[in-house]
């Protein structure tokens, strides 16, 4: 009754808001929408589709739409090939394979109806390819029958009707000839059916050497249909129920089609077969009527349509937004709706649909998908490109999400920084460097901490680390990370303490090279510059002792002894003394 929730990157935390005060605590539940993001077996899907997505964004906007259509169809097929490749690798994981099958089924239909936009005539042929691709068990059964000792007597022999239901007349004829050789008396009957199957007209807009209009095809098809009708009226196949059923299917007898529900298996296969034999020149605008009636005829009146049924029906009704909405609810990740919507948007099919909070549908879905990717330890890098191609809110999302990437190693931190620097995200770069500097300091890695603080341009932290270097020197008598200190360059100007550290190290180098005069001048300048910490005065005086004994060093006449140096240093730092 009392629940609260907090949105997280890619998930929701749900918690109880009222609980007993006697030491109990509320339960916190993590509700993940993008659960598949965490599945290692789907890594290939996310990685490969990322490359396709980036390629799609590079298609030139100035090209005419008609020139871009082949590219869009090719990209759609690339997406489907990635889905299919994943399915082939995941046959043992039935749950995920069934989801990918449904995803490819929907995508393929959207490709036919929206992206390729198949016109009347070729529309049914495209839908036949769609059905064949997603009902591949027909070939398996046929191979099993033909491989047996006596194919014509195999119990599944007459499942050859499946070939007819898919419009695969050549394959059907090859199987039927096996039966014809066993029944010499019925050879004329088989020959007649073979002739009808062979003569069935197929609309072919790409036929070499000829251009077939839709009207010409329709006339040719009607003549063939009349010929099949005459064979039925003449009862040419009355003595063989199987051949008569095939003949009735050729004239689109819906009762006979529904008798073979088991072979059709789905209402949309029934729809395509029904169109093939009754309405082969159906127009896209007429599809919704046949789709609705086919679903009602095929499904039991008591059964409720599955989510997949509703999605496919919405596609046949050309309601793109309903397809996307239903898929967002039915599927357990944003991969499908994000990539499909992006492709449809490039095809200029979603331009009119903006959301109430200012973004368009494409960007909203890509932002959701990319946010989910960012919660994964290795997929987060893919998300960056998705954010880059979301012009409205992508930059804001990236800035928020990049700060949540766990900086487990310096290598990963450098990778994140490179991403930020390429996009001029200076605040994020500074924040990451500060985090890494503090982490290095906690682990007593002073060189790394100083390097990160310099990169962050954090003067206060650089001062703190410089003092730690000086404390270490006082305790050990040597500097650690000499390469870093020796090569500070202009970076030493970030803070006075860092300047002192760099110059003091330079003093030691000069002294080591026996350039005593230069070393003395530098030491004196360090004393007079008032940048040395008070705790370091005695160290400076001690360093000056051996230099006072060097004859080649020309000290100022007022500084000829350690006593003079002490008074000088004291007067500089404590004028009242």
Image (cartoon, helix red, strand yellow):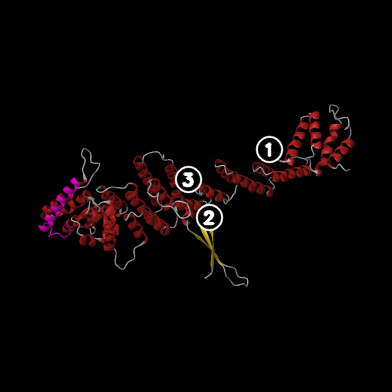
Q: Would you name the residue on which mark 3 appears? A: 389
Compared to residue 562, the image places residue 134 above or below, namely below
Crowding at label 1, few (<14), some or many (≥20) Cα neighbours within 10 Å? some
Crowding at label 2, few (<14), some or many (≥20) Cα neighbours within 10 Å? some
Q: Which mark is residue 464?
A: none
Relative side of 159 to 63, left or right: left
Which label's residue is closer to the chain start, 2 or 3? 2
Crowding at label 3, few (<14), some or many (≥20) Cα neighbours within 10 Å? some
Q: How many marks?
A: 3
**Which quarter shows the C terminus?**
top right
| Nearer to us in this view, 492 or 87 | 492
Q: Main SS of the magenta segment?
A: helix
Q: Would you name the residue on which mark 2 appears? A: 9
Relative side of 475 to 109, left or right: right
**Which dot, 2 or 3, sits closer to the camera?**
3
Q: Would you name the residue on which mark 1 appears? A: 491
Q: Gap between marks 2 and 3, in whole Å?
A: 19 Å
| Nearer to us in this view, 245 or 314 | 314
Which label's residue is closer to the chain start, 1 or 3? 3
| Nearer to us in this view, 45 or 218 | 218
**Which dot, 1 or 3, sits closer to the camera?**
3
Identify the magenta region: 215-243
Q: Gap between marks 1 and 2, in whole Å?
A: 37 Å
Relative side of 350 to 278, left or right: right
Q: Please indicate, yes or no, whether residue 548 appears anywhere in the rendered image.
A: yes
């Amino acid at each position: 009754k009392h629940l609260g929730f907090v949105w997280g990157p890619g998930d929701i935390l749900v918690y109880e808001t009222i609980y007993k005060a006697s030491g109990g605590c509320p339960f916190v539940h993590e509700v993940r929408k993008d659960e598949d993001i965490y599945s290692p077996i789907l890594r290939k899907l996310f990685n490969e589709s990322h490359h396709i997505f980036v390629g799609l964004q590079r298609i030139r906007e100035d090209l005419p739409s008609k020139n871009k259509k082949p590219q869009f169809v090719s990209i759609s097929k690339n997406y489907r090939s990635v889905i299919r490749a994943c399915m082939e690798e995941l046959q043992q994981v039935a749950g995920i394979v069934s989801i990918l099958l449904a995803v490819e089924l929907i995508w393929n239909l959207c490709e036919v109806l929206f992206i390729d936009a198949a016109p009347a005539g070729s529309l049914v042929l495209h839908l036949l390819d769609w059905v064949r691709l997603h009902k591949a068990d027909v070939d398996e059964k046929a191979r099993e029958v033909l491989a047996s000792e006596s194919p014509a007597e195999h119990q599944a022999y007459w499942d050859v009707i499946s070939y007819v239901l898919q419009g695969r007349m050549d394959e059907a004829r090859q199987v039927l000839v096996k039966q014809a050789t066993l029944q010499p008396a019925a050879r004329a009957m088989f020959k007649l059916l073979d002739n009808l199957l062979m003569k069935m007209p197929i609309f072919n807009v790409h036929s070499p050497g000829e251009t077939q209009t839709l009207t010409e095809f329709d006339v040719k098809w009607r003549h063939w249909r009349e010929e099949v009708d005459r064979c039925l009226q003449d009862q040419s196949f009355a003595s063989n129920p199987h051949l008569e059923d095939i003949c009735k299917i050729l004239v689109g007898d819906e009762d006979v089609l529904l008798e073979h529900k088991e072979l059709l298996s789905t209402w949309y296969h029934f729809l395509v077969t029904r169109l093939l034999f009754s309405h082969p020149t159906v127009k896209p605008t007429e599809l919704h009527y046949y789709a609705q009636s086919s679903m009602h005829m095929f499904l039991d009146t008591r059964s409720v349509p599955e989510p997949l049924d509703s999605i496919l029906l919405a596609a046949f009704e050309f309601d793109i937004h309903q397809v996307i909405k239903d898929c967002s609810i039915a599927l357990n990740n944003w991969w499908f709706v994000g990539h499909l919507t992006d492709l449809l948007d490039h095809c200029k099919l979603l331009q009119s649909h903006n959301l109430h909070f200012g973004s368009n549908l494409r960007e909203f879905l890509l932002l959701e998908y990319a946010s989910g990717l960012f919660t994964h330890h290795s997929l987060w890098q893919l998300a960056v490109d998705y954010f880059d191609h979301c012009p409205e809110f992508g930059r804001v999302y990236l800035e928020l999400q990049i700060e949540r990437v766990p900086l487990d190693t310096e290598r990963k931190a450098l990778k994140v920084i490179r991403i930020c620097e390429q996009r001029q995200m200076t605040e994020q770069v500074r924040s990451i460097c500060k985090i890494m500097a503090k982490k290095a300091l906690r682990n007593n890695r002073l060189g790394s901490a100083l390097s990160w603080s310099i990169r962050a341009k954090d003067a206060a932290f650089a001062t703190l680390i410089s003092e730690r270097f000086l404390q270490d020197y006082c305790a050990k008598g040597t500097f650690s990370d000499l390469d870093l200190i020796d090569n500070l360059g202009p970076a030493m100007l970030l803070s006075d303490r860092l300047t002192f550290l760099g110059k003091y190290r330079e003093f030691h180098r000069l002294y080591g090279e026996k350039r005593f005069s230069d070393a003395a001048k530098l030491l004196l300048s360090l004393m007079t510059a008032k940048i040395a910490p008070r705790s370091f005065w005695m160290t400076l005086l001690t360093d000056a002792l051996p230099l006072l004994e060097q004859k080649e060093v020309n000290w100022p006449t007022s500084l000829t002894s350690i006593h003079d140096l002490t008074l000088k240093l004291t007067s500089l730092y404590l004028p009242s003394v």
